[in-house]
């Protein structure tokens, strides 16, 4: 089958022919319908230290996907053949204390598609049956694929208490933007957002931000204070991984507020714990992955009740064969989610051609 | 009356005669029976930047105390004359959103005894009636006085879930040591502690630490890992204000763990959010003051049920007139709580004479 | 001034002249702009056992109101003269363990307007300054008045976790209907409702119920099961005070679900704890009053963000002089909230004339 | 092998020879070392309606046990052969929304040993590997066996917040008595208990109750009020299944208190929701089984830290062949836990001979 692989240590990716995987015990074989690109995939393409520490080439990459179950490995009866599924990308051990007490998303044995095991930018992928999330028939493939990423947003948005609260989202990459939609669905009083990309601030407003701020052009602190009658915000969702944004975000947080951190800084940063956290009695939540499986049920509720409409998030579609162009667009920041289709006939909207 | 005051900007304190305060509307006049020294008082004596920013001399200092109510200001009927009370040192506004939603300890209008208003290292103090906590008759004055400080420990210890968990306390100043006793009373499975003072590690063990570590002499990380079968700890109470201790504490924290931060670093520090908080899904709680008034009720329960015995904490007693010696001992770290008595006849144990 | 009073034990009310109250220490005098009728007022009119146990005639009745502050008692500076305020009807002691630990709504010394002290169906009322909630200038008086009652709904709706969940509201009196709007604002996936009044089921749908059921005409259990794909509901809000409704509601509750009980049954009822609560691991919350003051802040957030629009709730307006007709309508159930105006010129909509 | 079975519908049990089970896929074969008798086993022996509805004879009964793993079914590697394990008696589906969101103890497909599938009052039992809880080598078999039942107590005790609180336990059967020990380990301020058996009240005091009450001889309400300075209790653990006890327990509960219900009433009861729950703002938790697997980890922490010592609970040991005498003793109530040993040589204390 065709697959996008990291062929060897170093920058770059290649579309190559690899053997079609066979589903092992407890696994299913999925015919991939759509796969979406995550920031992590860019790190792997660029071969930054995070990627070099974790990925052993050759490796099929990609971890956001949906497809149809076409074969069952031994001992598997469910989900049924022919059903559309999305894939939870974190394969966990199931037996450690974290897995056995409702915190499997923190399992220390986690194996991630496209990082530790072959991924989804391919025509087929083998996945544990328990990692398959049944989608309703007729769900657009692009939406079904990006649910994994939406799950990061929902996990972040639902960890602090946001109902009736003023929320600031620093960082409007796709997860940040989807978090805006999620906090609104959860009853936030207002959502403000910041980023240095005007494209993404536009998308943020389209997904529900009441006001947006570009720190490259204006004073974020002054802007948010003005927009909140001088109060600041009750909740901070830090999705940027930028030290200055985090500092301003915490400065804008009211005493007793809550912050959820999903953004990665890639290195230690300078931080004023006394004034940003201790004196204000702030609570901070580190966020990784999706709660297994509470987050998926939350997503289902948001999507089926139409509290969240992810349609505007899918800004570009590509044939998988055009992955280079898709990655280049993703790297430019001039996009929301970029979705690729191994079979262009499966595309649920017009394809961009390079 | 005699009082220990900060007479003018700059280091040093003085015992001087000042007018006895008169209780205003809603206040009571308290005859001080005992007052204990807090680390904050050392900062004010030394006139560090924190103190210089907040204290306007001349100011009577001190904020941990107990005494007998001897006069009522206008509109006050309770607590009754003659009753023994401890004093909550944070005077809050009562009407802001924080005060009105159970988070008065974070009130932005907080006025603190011995910092923003005249304090308790004196023969008498006027305090709002609502800040008086009734003590049982016969409670030793030294214990009654240090409850305010014990409240910091109880607030810190009770914010994360500690029952059945392995806990590390970094920093064994008096609050850290009392937090050890508090987490044990709350059902912690085991409590480990670190400090660079052997005196305080001894006290930590006397108050319930299962094992202690001196990072000046041994590898804290290795020691805690060995003591926890390689698991690390579920909860970190950071009471040291030392960046290296905080970093090691967070490194020792298990995925999904909780940290409570009471220690102040006095400046921004370098911190690895990605590996210490985000990837591990850790929750961090900034802690300040005591929850008004939940923490006081928790203290009462711990003391009356004898789940905590604070007697070993009171290592030294001084006459108030010997405050210089008391402060010098406190600065040396060779002590637990140091309690001063305006009237030496009120001392509930042998006085140390300089 | 004119006031609606319970003149003597027994059924009935009378509009009489009574002395205008004078604000005591800590109180303000309010010129009443609007007052709304609560089910409790009907109980007092009818002199049922609950009322006979609590109300000592002669008593001005009524507890939902808004008005303008026109005089300050001693020691009061806030809210300023001329400001529009709504009134929290529960006057609490402020010093008991419940008041001091964020549960003042459960204070055992609670004194309620129109029950234990003179109420608001009058031209003027004296109220503690701390019971006054500032309203934005221009808020319609009818909405400002019924906030007290909306607070019961918000308290009930926000006690269980409703975001993303399927909710059943049994009982569509005004509080039940407002609770429908509140759970939707809090992100519920869907809200179902039941009542035996078609008028109120219409109102329930107008305020956001996805489907409604009339147990007098159809099988509530079958209807809700059909509407939830056979799952039942995650949350029950019991607002009816009808034993059969409560039983069906709990039967429809899924394992692990939550129920909030606001409705009063007026007597012990038969209840199957084993099957309705224990085996299903259900959590039940008794609800009374409004959380002081968290519920008021939640209301403010819902109303200012327009997440909830209470306009459809105000179905009828009367001059206070026509209170008999207003009460008769309220007793008929053919209405939402019924609001009375001491000065007909203050009415924010057309008055109903008897 | 020998096993105690319900041979046919109707009262009574029989010790008979049945085929030794073979472990299926995912299962292990356990050589039973000890099994303890639960109240449920008495219901099955007596063939009450609950049992008649669920048990299909012939059925090996019993569900509390420990033993040594002696064979692995297909696909099983863990726990290792030769290891001592206790058995979680609830076999859950693992795939429903409850199982997948941390509430597997409420799984609607639960199959219970000795009820829906062959049980543990036998020489051998086959159990899913995931239901095996590894015990430390050297743990007394009687303690290892009764952990399942201790888990009910820990689940009940840890659901309300008990630290620093006054707790009343109504019903001192073995689970009630073990709950007393658990709430003390969790930091309760004081624990009071009631039962009509003096034997069990003695055991309750031995396990940590500060005071006990026998409603057959004294006024429970008056006794508890006297023991709590007229305050009543903050937490009620209802373990009796007696309507009058529940009513008194709720009456003694303070406003804002919490109740956990484990006792079964076997039929609907009369209950005053208005005064017992709604007006007081009480929260009620239905409790069933053990949280999978949080409760087991909590037990491990309590036992290893010696916060709880279950030794006094094991009041009687019998050879399995003497099951009739063991059951008769259990029915008399003159005992704590009664443990049976298929091989008398495995007994960890003196055997009672009929």
Image (spheres, coloured by chain):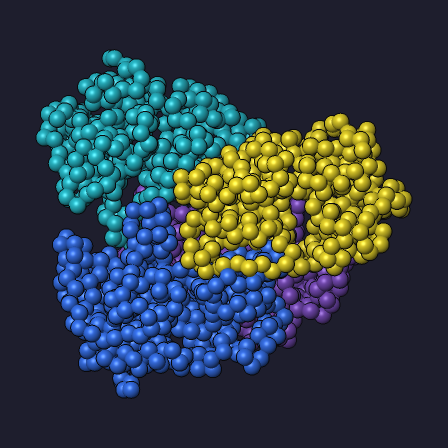
Chain colours: A purple, B cyan, C blue, D yellow
Along the viewing direction, whichever of A292 and A101 lies nearer the viewer: A101
At horizontal 30% and vertical 54% (from top left) the residue drawn is C92
Residue C290 at x, y = what percent? 36, 60
**For this view, does D337 lie left or right of residue D282?**
right
At horizontal 27% and vertical 78% (from top left) the residue drawn is C323
Please say whether residue A15 is visible from this viewpoint.
Answer: no
Examine the image and state in which quarter residue D136 appears. Answer: top right
Extreme residue toward the top, this view:
B353
At horizontal 23% and vertical 80% (from top left) the residue drawn is C321
Q: Is residue B71 above or below residue B311?
A: below
Question: How many labels sit on residues?
Answer: 0
Please say whether residue D290 is visible from this viewpoint.
Answer: yes
Residue B253 at x, y = what percent? 51, 38
Q: Is residue A346 above or below residue C289?
A: below
Q: Is residue B210 above or below residue C188?
A: above
Along the viewing direction, whichever of A237 and D101 lies nearer the viewer: D101
**For this view, does B115 lie left or right of residue D288?**
left
Residue D118 at x, y = what percent? 80, 49
At horizontal 17% and vertical 69% (from top left) the residue drawn is C18
Q: Is residue C134 above or below residue A221?
A: below
Along the viewing direction, whichever of D27 and A340 lies nearer the viewer: D27
- The quadrant of the picture occupied by the C terminus of chain A is bottom right
Along the viewing direction, whichever of A343 and C50 lies nearer the viewer: C50
Examine the image and state in which quarter residue D143 appears. Answer: top right
**For this view, does C45 lie left or right of residue B115?**
right
Residue B114 at x, y = what percent? 21, 34
């Amino acid at each position: 089958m065709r697959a996008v692989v990291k062929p060897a240590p170093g920058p770059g990716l290649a579309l190559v022919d690899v053997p079609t995987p066979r589903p092992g015990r407890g696994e299913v074989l999925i015919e991939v319908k759509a796969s979406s690109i995550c920031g992590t995939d860019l790190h792997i393409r660029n071969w930054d230290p995070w990627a070099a520490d974790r990925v052993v080439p050759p490796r099929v990459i990609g971890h956001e996907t949906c497809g149809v179950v076409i074969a069952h490995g031994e001992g598997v009866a469910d989900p049924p053949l022919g059903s559309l599924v999305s894939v939870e990308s974190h394969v966990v051990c199931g037996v450690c204390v974290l897995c056995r007490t409702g915190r499997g998303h923190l399992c220390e044995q986690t194996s991630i598609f496209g990082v530790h095991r072959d991924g989804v930018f391919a025509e087929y992928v083998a996945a544990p049956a328990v990692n398959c999330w049944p989608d309703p028939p007729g769900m657009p493939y692009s939406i079904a694929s990006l649910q994994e990423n939406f799950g990061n947003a929902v996990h972040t948005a639902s960890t602090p208490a946001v109902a009736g609260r003023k929320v600031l989202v620093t960082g409007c990459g796709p997860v940040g933007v989807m978090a805006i939609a999620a906090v609104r669905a959860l009853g936030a009083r207002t959502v403000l957002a910041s980023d240095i990309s005007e494209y993404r601030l536009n998308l943020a407003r389209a997904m529900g931000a009441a006001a947006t701020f570009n720190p490259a052009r204006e004073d974020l602190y002054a802007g948010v204070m003005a927009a909140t009658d001088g109060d600041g915000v009750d909740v901070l969702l830090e999705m940027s991984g930028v030290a200055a944004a985090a500092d301003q975000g915490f400065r804008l947080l009211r005493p007793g507020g809550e912050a959820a951190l999903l953004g990665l800084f890639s290195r230690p940063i300078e931080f004023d714990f006394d004034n940003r956290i201790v004196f204000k009695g702030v609570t901070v939540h580190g966020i990784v992955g999706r709660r297994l499986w509470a987050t998926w049920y939350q997503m289902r509720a948001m999507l089926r009740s139409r509290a969240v409409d992810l349609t505007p998030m899918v800004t570009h579609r590509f044939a998988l064969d055009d992955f280079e162009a898709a990655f280049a667009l993703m790297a430019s920041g001039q996009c929301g989610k970029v979705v690729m289709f191994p079979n262009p006939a499966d595309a649920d909207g017009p394809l961009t051609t390079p």
